Image (spheres, grey):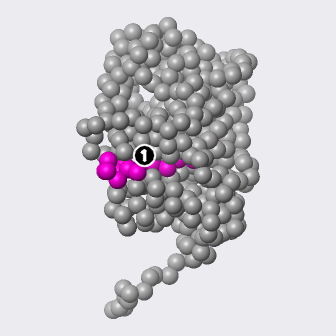
Amino acid sequence: MEVVNRTEAPEYKRIEEVRVPAIATLTMDNGQPLYGINAGQQPVIRLEVIFDAGAWYEPLPGLSTLAMKMLTEGTHSHTSAQISEYFDRFGAFVEQQSGTNRASLTVYGLTKHLPALLPMIQEMLMESVIPEKELNHQKNITLQTLRVNLEKNNFVASRLIREKVFGAHHPYGHNQKPETLEAIQRDGVEAYYRQRIRQRPFRVMVAGQIAETEIALINQYLGHQVVETVPETADAAKTAISDFSPGLVDKPDSLQSSIRLGRLLFTRKHPDYFPTLVMNEVLGGYFGSRLMKNIREEKGFTYGIWSNLAMHPNEGSFLIGTDVKRENTQETLDEIGKEIGRLREELVPENELETVRNYMAGSYVGNLNTPFEIADRYKALLFDGLPADYISTYIEHIRAVTAEQVLEMANRYLPDGSLIEVVVGGK
């Protein structure tokens, strides 16, 4: 029996490249793109129908989310209960999402049931009736959830930092409030559905065990929908304008404070993206980061502290966040400042930088295990206008980042006074 020496770390294999199944790109009969990834060992499929219908396009915060939720709440031929029972009959799961720029209807199911699922998917997209009762029910659920969340420091802090980074009227910065939610009426939801979803351009992403048969079926239904294109109009409110005044929401009875620091940044297409991504990882991007070692392990102020780059199609931001005891708030802010200062003044040691690069490479590859995860990576590439070799060269770009570049990025994007400060709780 082989004896394992527990005092020595196991050998690791250095990851140098990413290998993922190729994505097939087709144009359906109505001119809409269809992206397919044939991968996986199980006979399952995920079909996404994706629209330009996220927060970027909505006149009122929350309108996109409600419009997408209503797709399963009734059509001209089926009630919400009948739609739910129909998908349950085939063991399928339906999910609606609305993000910053895109909104999607996603169906998970067995590949063999795709012929039965597609007619209902098409019906929901084309014949939603936005029933008043179901809409009010969804509004009440959303309203109650919002009111509960508004009592949470971390929720309020995250909303406030987004508002300050992008601007209160910017699509990425405007926040849903009880009064704005109550102002949404059925005619507004129906108008949004007709303007952004029904008979509007869309993209299909399908992943799992698929073949030409499944592609032909999707084209038979979704590829023959009538699609009308409406020209987009410019909107001055979509220019991000940051508010650098500190944000303090004082809660005398709160034992904890939620801290958020942030600034406007760039998108993934910027030439500084990869060096800044590595800089962020060193600072607070993973469990062994400098902020975690300082604020969590050495000071014991928090269970966790993080920093990340939030990348959207039109804008990006850099954010730092943590929750600490109220009395430790200012000291935590000071220590965060010290760690950022170190990044600006000292080169990251090569052994630390190599650990970070190895972690980032392993994490990236580790999130490409299933066809659905691979499809998610391709979505960022396709829909955000990234280079065709973005996935295959990701690790190469990460490994090319030097300590000198990390120092340069810290000085360029994190100088004194560059981060907006938000505290909810108290100092």
Say if the magenta span includes residue 263: no
| Secondary structure beneath label 1 | strand
Q: Determine which residue is flagged by label 1.
A: 259
Is 235 on the left or on the right of 173, as rendered?
Answer: right
Say if the magenta span includes residue 325: yes
Of residues 374 and 346, which is closer to you in this image? 346
Identify the residue at image location x=59%, y=63%. Answer: 343
Is 184 on the left or on the right of 388, as rendered?
Answer: left
Find residue 389 and report its horizontal and vertical position in percent: 72, 54
Identify the residue at image location x=68%, y=21%. Answer: 235
Disc 1: CA contacts within 10 A as few (<14), some (14-19) or many (>=20): many
Find residue 367 and report its horizontal and vertical position in percent: 52, 56
Q: Quadrant of residue 404?
A: bottom right
Identify the residue at image location x=59%, y=47%. Answer: 417
For the N terminus, give its image quadrant: bottom left
Find residue 91 and report its horizontal and vertical position in percent: 37, 37
Which residue type carries mark 1? Ile
Of residues 196 and 36, which is closer to you in this image? 196
Magenta part of the chain: 316-330
- Is residue 358 shown above or below 103? below
Of residues 6 and 183, which is closer to you in this image? 183
**Count of numbered circles on the image:** 1
Identify the residue at image location x=61%, y=15%. Answer: 195
Magenta portion: prevailing SS class = strand
- Is residue 285 shown above or below 243? below
Of residues 272 and 114, which is closer to you in this image? 272
